[in-house]
Protein backbone atom coordinates (compact mmCIF):
# COMPACT_ATOMS: atom_id res chain seq x y z
CA UNK A 1 0.00 0.00 0.00
CA UNK A 2 1.48 3.36 -0.98
CA UNK A 3 1.40 6.44 1.19
CA UNK A 4 -1.19 7.96 -1.12
CA UNK A 5 -3.45 4.95 -0.66
CA UNK A 6 -3.21 5.13 3.12
CA UNK A 7 -3.84 8.86 2.99
CA UNK A 8 -6.87 8.52 0.74
CA UNK A 9 -8.50 5.87 2.93
CA UNK A 10 -7.96 7.91 6.08
CA UNK A 11 -9.34 11.05 4.51
CA UNK A 12 -12.29 9.26 2.91
CA UNK A 13 -13.22 8.08 6.40
CA UNK A 14 -12.74 11.49 7.98
CA UNK A 15 -14.61 13.43 5.31
CA UNK A 16 -17.21 10.73 4.75
CA UNK A 17 -18.55 11.03 8.26
CA UNK A 18 -16.57 8.40 10.16
CA UNK A 19 -12.96 8.56 11.31
CA UNK A 20 -11.30 5.23 11.90
CA UNK A 21 -9.64 6.71 14.96
CA UNK A 22 -12.57 8.20 16.87
CA UNK A 23 -14.64 6.83 19.76
CA UNK A 24 -17.46 6.46 17.21
CA UNK A 25 -15.37 3.95 15.28
CA UNK A 26 -14.56 2.00 18.45
CA UNK A 27 -18.23 1.96 19.46
CA UNK A 28 -19.32 0.80 16.00
CA UNK A 29 -16.61 -1.87 15.86
CA UNK A 30 -17.60 -3.22 19.26
CA UNK A 31 -21.27 -3.31 18.26
CA UNK A 32 -20.47 -5.13 15.02
CA UNK A 33 -18.23 -7.58 16.87
CA UNK A 34 -21.27 -8.86 18.74
CA UNK A 35 -22.60 -10.26 15.48
CA UNK A 36 -21.22 -13.52 14.05
CA UNK A 37 -18.74 -13.42 11.20
CA UNK A 38 -20.21 -14.67 7.93
CA UNK A 39 -18.58 -17.95 6.92
CA UNK A 40 -19.39 -19.71 3.68
CA UNK A 41 -19.04 -23.42 2.86
CA UNK A 42 -16.12 -24.32 0.60
CA UNK A 43 -17.82 -26.31 -2.19
CA UNK A 44 -15.04 -28.92 -2.34
CA UNK A 45 -14.41 -28.71 1.40
CA UNK A 46 -16.58 -31.50 2.79
CA UNK A 47 -18.33 -29.17 5.21
CA UNK A 48 -15.45 -26.77 5.91
CA UNK A 49 -16.29 -23.07 5.83
CA UNK A 50 -14.17 -19.98 5.27
CA UNK A 51 -14.84 -16.65 7.03
CA UNK A 52 -15.81 -13.91 4.62
CA UNK A 53 -13.06 -11.37 5.39
CA UNK A 54 -9.31 -11.99 5.40
CA UNK A 55 -6.20 -10.04 4.51
CA UNK A 56 -3.97 -9.70 1.45
CA UNK A 57 -0.23 -9.19 1.92
CA UNK A 58 1.00 -7.76 -1.39
CA UNK A 59 3.10 -4.63 -0.75
CA UNK A 60 1.74 -4.10 2.78
CA UNK A 61 3.62 -7.05 4.31
CA UNK A 62 6.79 -6.49 2.28
CA UNK A 63 8.75 -5.19 5.27
CA UNK A 64 11.98 -5.92 7.05
CA UNK A 65 12.55 -7.96 10.24
CA UNK A 66 12.41 -4.81 12.37
CA UNK A 67 8.99 -3.84 10.98
CA UNK A 68 6.87 -6.80 12.07
CA UNK A 69 4.71 -4.81 14.48
CA UNK A 70 2.21 -3.70 11.83
CA UNK A 71 1.67 -7.12 10.21
CA UNK A 72 1.55 -8.72 13.67
CA UNK A 73 -1.21 -6.42 14.86
CA UNK A 74 -3.14 -6.87 11.60
CA UNK A 75 -3.07 -10.67 11.91
CA UNK A 76 -3.92 -10.54 15.61
CA UNK A 77 -6.87 -8.25 14.86
CA UNK A 78 -8.07 -10.50 12.04
CA UNK A 79 -7.95 -13.66 14.16
CA UNK A 80 -9.54 -11.95 17.16
CA UNK A 81 -12.34 -10.73 14.89
CA UNK A 82 -13.09 -14.15 13.41
CA UNK A 83 -11.08 -13.99 10.18
CA UNK A 84 -8.67 -16.69 9.02
CA UNK A 85 -7.61 -16.06 5.40
CA UNK A 86 -4.10 -14.75 4.73
CA UNK A 87 -3.27 -14.48 1.04
CA UNK A 88 0.40 -14.19 0.12
CA UNK A 89 2.91 -15.17 -2.57
CA UNK A 90 6.68 -15.51 -3.17
CA UNK A 91 6.46 -12.59 -5.60
CA UNK A 92 5.26 -10.26 -2.82
CA UNK A 93 8.80 -9.52 -1.69
CA UNK A 94 9.31 -10.41 1.97
CA UNK A 95 5.59 -11.02 2.60
CA UNK A 96 5.71 -14.82 2.80
CA UNK A 97 8.55 -14.71 5.28
CA UNK A 98 6.83 -12.00 7.29
CA UNK A 99 3.68 -14.14 7.53
CA UNK A 100 5.80 -17.08 8.63
CA UNK A 101 7.61 -15.02 11.26
CA UNK A 102 4.40 -13.50 12.64
CA UNK A 103 2.67 -16.85 12.91
CA UNK A 104 5.72 -18.44 14.54
CA UNK A 105 6.06 -15.57 17.01
CA UNK A 106 2.37 -15.49 17.93
CA UNK A 107 1.55 -19.18 17.81
CA UNK A 108 -1.42 -18.44 15.54
CA UNK A 109 -0.64 -20.90 12.73
CA UNK A 110 -3.54 -23.20 13.63
CA UNK A 111 -5.93 -20.23 13.66
CA UNK A 112 -5.37 -19.16 10.05
CA UNK A 113 -5.94 -20.33 6.49
CA UNK A 114 -2.77 -19.68 4.47
CA UNK A 115 -3.13 -19.21 0.73
CA UNK A 116 0.09 -18.86 -1.23
CA UNK A 117 1.10 -19.27 -4.85
CA UNK A 118 3.45 -20.91 -7.29
CA UNK A 119 5.01 -18.41 -9.68
CA UNK A 120 6.65 -20.72 -12.23
CA UNK A 121 4.72 -24.00 -11.79
CA UNK A 122 6.95 -25.82 -14.27
CA UNK A 123 5.65 -29.38 -14.71
CA UNK A 124 7.62 -31.71 -12.45
CA UNK A 125 9.10 -28.86 -10.40
CA UNK A 126 6.01 -27.78 -8.48
CA UNK A 127 7.04 -29.63 -5.33
CA UNK A 128 10.48 -27.97 -5.17
CA UNK A 129 8.88 -24.55 -5.52
CA UNK A 130 6.32 -25.41 -2.87
CA UNK A 131 9.05 -26.51 -0.45
CA UNK A 132 10.46 -22.98 -0.64
CA UNK A 133 7.03 -21.61 0.30
CA UNK A 134 6.78 -24.00 3.25
CA UNK A 135 10.20 -22.90 4.48
CA UNK A 136 9.35 -19.20 4.24
CA UNK A 137 5.98 -19.71 5.92
CA UNK A 138 7.48 -21.94 8.64
CA UNK A 139 4.73 -24.51 8.22
CA UNK A 140 4.46 -28.14 7.19
CA UNK A 141 1.30 -27.72 5.14
CA UNK A 142 -0.30 -25.01 3.02
CA UNK A 143 -4.05 -24.61 3.15
CA UNK A 144 -4.41 -23.32 -0.41
CA UNK A 145 -1.77 -23.58 -3.14
CA UNK A 146 -2.54 -21.50 -6.22
CA UNK A 147 -1.07 -21.15 -9.71
CA UNK A 148 -0.38 -17.42 -9.85
CA UNK A 149 -1.67 -15.33 -12.76
CA UNK A 150 -2.53 -18.15 -15.16
CA UNK A 151 -2.33 -17.25 -18.84
CA UNK A 152 -2.57 -20.50 -20.79
CA UNK A 153 -6.13 -21.79 -21.37
CA UNK A 154 -4.66 -25.28 -21.59
CA UNK A 155 -3.08 -25.07 -18.13
CA UNK A 156 -3.49 -28.29 -16.19
CA UNK A 157 -3.76 -28.72 -12.43
CA UNK A 158 -2.15 -32.17 -12.27
CA UNK A 159 1.06 -30.95 -10.64
CA UNK A 160 -0.58 -29.14 -7.72
CA UNK A 161 -3.27 -31.78 -7.42
CA UNK A 162 -0.47 -34.32 -6.87
CA UNK A 163 0.81 -32.17 -4.00
CA UNK A 164 -2.70 -32.14 -2.57
CA UNK A 165 -2.78 -35.93 -2.77
CA UNK A 166 0.51 -36.03 -0.85
CA UNK A 167 -0.92 -33.82 1.88
CA UNK A 168 1.44 -30.91 1.19
CA UNK A 169 -1.56 -28.65 0.59
CA UNK A 170 -5.24 -29.02 1.39
CA UNK A 171 -6.73 -27.15 -1.58
CA UNK A 172 -5.54 -26.02 -5.00
CA UNK A 173 -6.53 -23.07 -7.13
CA UNK A 174 -5.64 -20.47 -9.72
CA UNK A 175 -5.39 -16.69 -9.71
CA UNK A 176 -5.45 -13.74 -12.05
CA UNK A 177 -5.82 -9.99 -11.78
CA UNK A 178 -5.46 -9.35 -15.50
CA UNK A 179 -8.46 -8.96 -17.80
CA UNK A 180 -6.34 -10.23 -20.69
CA UNK A 181 -6.27 -13.61 -18.89
CA UNK A 182 -9.99 -13.88 -18.16
CA UNK A 183 -10.70 -16.11 -21.16
CA UNK A 184 -7.90 -18.48 -20.16
CA UNK A 185 -9.12 -18.41 -16.57
CA UNK A 186 -12.65 -19.31 -17.60
CA UNK A 187 -11.39 -22.20 -19.73
CA UNK A 188 -9.33 -23.61 -16.85
CA UNK A 189 -12.22 -23.32 -14.42
CA UNK A 190 -14.60 -25.14 -16.73
CA UNK A 191 -12.16 -27.95 -17.51
CA UNK A 192 -10.15 -28.39 -14.30
CA UNK A 193 -12.75 -27.29 -11.71
CA UNK A 194 -10.16 -25.98 -9.21
CA UNK A 195 -11.03 -25.70 -5.55
CA UNK A 196 -10.47 -21.92 -5.53
CA UNK A 197 -10.13 -18.90 -7.77
CA UNK A 198 -8.59 -15.62 -6.60
CA UNK A 199 -9.53 -12.75 -8.90
CA UNK A 200 -9.84 -8.96 -8.97
CA UNK A 201 -13.36 -7.62 -8.43
CA UNK A 202 -14.66 -4.28 -7.18
CA UNK A 203 -17.85 -2.23 -7.27
CA UNK A 204 -16.42 -0.33 -10.26
CA UNK A 205 -14.70 -3.36 -11.81
CA UNK A 206 -17.46 -5.88 -12.51
CA UNK A 207 -16.34 -7.72 -15.65
CA UNK A 208 -16.09 -11.04 -13.76
CA UNK A 209 -19.85 -11.06 -13.19
CA UNK A 210 -20.61 -11.91 -16.82
CA UNK A 211 -18.79 -15.22 -17.24
CA UNK A 212 -16.15 -15.94 -14.61
CA UNK A 213 -18.36 -16.01 -11.52
CA UNK A 214 -21.09 -18.12 -13.16
CA UNK A 215 -18.39 -20.56 -14.33
CA UNK A 216 -17.15 -20.84 -10.75
CA UNK A 217 -20.64 -21.56 -9.48
CA UNK A 218 -21.07 -24.31 -12.07
CA UNK A 219 -17.66 -25.84 -11.27
CA UNK A 220 -18.01 -25.65 -7.49
CA UNK A 221 -15.00 -23.32 -7.33
CA UNK A 222 -14.81 -21.08 -4.27
CA UNK A 223 -14.10 -17.43 -5.12
CA UNK A 224 -11.67 -15.20 -3.24
CA UNK A 225 -11.50 -11.52 -4.12
CA UNK A 226 -8.29 -9.56 -4.63
CA UNK A 227 -8.07 -5.78 -5.04
CA UNK A 228 -11.60 -5.13 -3.70
CA UNK A 229 -10.71 -1.44 -3.28
CA UNK A 230 -9.10 -1.18 -6.72
CA UNK A 231 -5.61 -0.48 -5.34
CA UNK A 232 -7.08 2.39 -3.29
CA UNK A 233 -8.92 3.87 -6.27
CA UNK A 234 -12.31 3.58 -4.59
CA UNK A 235 -11.21 5.51 -1.52
CA UNK A 236 -9.85 8.27 -3.71
CA UNK A 237 -13.18 8.30 -5.53
CA UNK A 238 -15.09 8.49 -2.25
CA UNK A 239 -12.91 11.26 -0.87
CA UNK A 240 -15.20 13.89 0.64
CA UNK A 241 -18.38 11.96 -0.17
CA UNK A 242 -20.94 11.10 2.49
CA UNK A 243 -21.80 7.49 3.13
CA UNK A 244 -25.51 7.27 2.21
CA UNK A 245 -27.93 6.98 5.11
CA UNK A 246 -29.50 3.90 3.55
CA UNK A 247 -26.20 2.02 4.05
CA UNK A 248 -27.42 1.41 7.60
CA UNK A 249 -30.11 -0.85 6.13
CA UNK A 250 -27.41 -3.48 5.56
CA UNK A 251 -25.37 -2.74 8.68
CA UNK A 252 -22.71 -0.73 6.89
CA UNK A 253 -20.72 1.81 8.90
CA UNK A 254 -17.88 2.89 6.59
CA UNK A 255 -16.86 3.21 2.96
CA UNK A 256 -14.61 0.17 3.33
CA UNK A 257 -17.56 -1.92 4.47
CA UNK A 258 -19.73 -0.46 1.69
CA UNK A 259 -17.28 -1.64 -0.97
CA UNK A 260 -16.73 -5.06 0.64
CA UNK A 261 -20.39 -5.81 1.39
CA UNK A 262 -21.19 -5.17 -2.27
CA UNK A 263 -18.84 -8.00 -3.21
CA UNK A 264 -19.81 -10.38 -0.42
CA UNK A 265 -23.46 -10.06 -1.42
CA UNK A 266 -22.72 -11.78 -4.74
CA UNK A 267 -23.69 -15.46 -4.31
CA UNK A 268 -20.50 -16.72 -6.00
CA UNK A 269 -18.12 -14.88 -3.65
CA UNK A 270 -16.80 -16.69 -0.58
CA UNK A 271 -14.29 -14.24 0.90
CA UNK A 272 -12.49 -10.96 0.28
CA UNK A 273 -8.80 -10.34 0.97
CA UNK A 274 -8.14 -6.59 1.08
CA UNK A 275 -4.57 -5.65 1.86
CA UNK A 276 -3.86 -3.47 4.87
CA UNK A 277 -0.98 -2.61 7.17
CA UNK A 278 -3.20 -1.05 9.85
CA UNK A 279 -5.03 -2.98 12.58
CA UNK A 280 -7.84 -0.39 12.68
CA UNK A 281 -8.44 -0.90 8.95
CA UNK A 282 -8.47 -4.66 9.51
CA UNK A 283 -11.10 -4.25 12.23
CA UNK A 284 -13.17 -2.03 9.96
CA UNK A 285 -12.90 -4.54 7.10
CA UNK A 286 -14.08 -7.35 9.38
CA UNK A 287 -17.31 -5.43 9.94
CA UNK A 288 -18.21 -6.12 6.32
CA UNK A 289 -18.59 -9.79 7.18
CA UNK A 290 -21.11 -9.15 9.94
CA UNK A 291 -24.78 -8.26 9.92
CA UNK A 292 -26.98 -7.90 6.88
CA UNK A 293 -25.83 -7.85 3.27
CA UNK A 294 -27.46 -5.86 0.47
CA UNK A 295 -29.93 -7.66 -1.79
CA UNK A 296 -29.64 -7.60 -5.59
CA UNK A 297 -31.67 -4.43 -5.96
CA UNK A 298 -29.62 -2.63 -3.33
CA UNK A 299 -26.38 -3.76 -4.97
CA UNK A 300 -27.41 -2.01 -8.15
CA UNK A 301 -28.30 1.08 -6.15
CA UNK A 302 -24.84 0.97 -4.56
CA UNK A 303 -23.11 0.70 -7.93
CA UNK A 304 -25.15 3.58 -9.33
CA UNK A 305 -24.33 5.70 -6.28
CA UNK A 306 -20.59 5.18 -6.83
CA UNK A 307 -20.89 5.74 -10.59
CA UNK A 308 -22.46 9.13 -9.89
CA UNK A 309 -19.42 10.39 -7.94
Image (tube, helix red, strand yellow):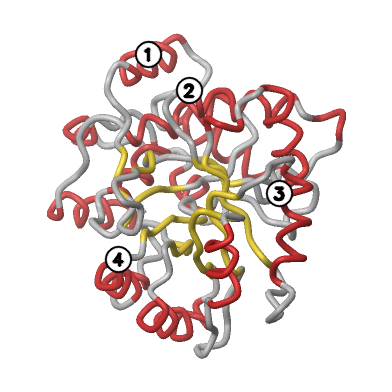
For label 2, the SS is loop
Mark 3 vs 2, N-terminal side: 2
For label 3, the SS is loop
Count of labels shown?
4
The residue that label 2 is drawn on is: 19
* Marks 3,2: beta carbons within 8 A: no
Mark 4 vs 1, N-terminal side: 1
* Marks 4,1: beta carbons within 8 A: no
Left or right of 173 in this view: 219: left
The residue that label 3 is drawn on is: 59
Left or right of 273 in this view: 76: right
The residue that label 4 is drawn on is: 220
Which is in the foreground here, disc 4 or disc 1?
A: 4
Q: Which mark is residue 30?
A: 1
Residue 36 is situated, as x and y percent measured from the top left of the image, at 28, 25
* Marks 1,2: beta carbons within 8 A: no
Tell me if mark 4 has few (under 14), some (14-19) or many (20+) residues whose alpha carbon lies within 10 angstroms of its own.
some
* Marks 2,4: beta carbons within 8 A: no
Q: Residue furthest bottom?
A: 154
At a point 35% along the width and 65% down the height, the residue shown is 221
- State the separation of the CA atoms marked 4 and 1: 35 Å
For label 1, the SS is helix
Residue 101 is situated, as x and y percent measured from the top left of the image, at 76, 33
Amino acid sequence: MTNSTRYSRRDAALLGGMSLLTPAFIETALAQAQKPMLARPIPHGKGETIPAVGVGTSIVFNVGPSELAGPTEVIRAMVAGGGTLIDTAPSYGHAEGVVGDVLANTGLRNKVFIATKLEDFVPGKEEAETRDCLKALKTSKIDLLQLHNVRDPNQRMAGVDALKAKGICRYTGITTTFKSAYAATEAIIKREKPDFLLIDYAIDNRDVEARILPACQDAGTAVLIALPFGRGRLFRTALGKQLPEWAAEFDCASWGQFFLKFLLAHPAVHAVAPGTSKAQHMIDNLGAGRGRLPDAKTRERMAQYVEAF
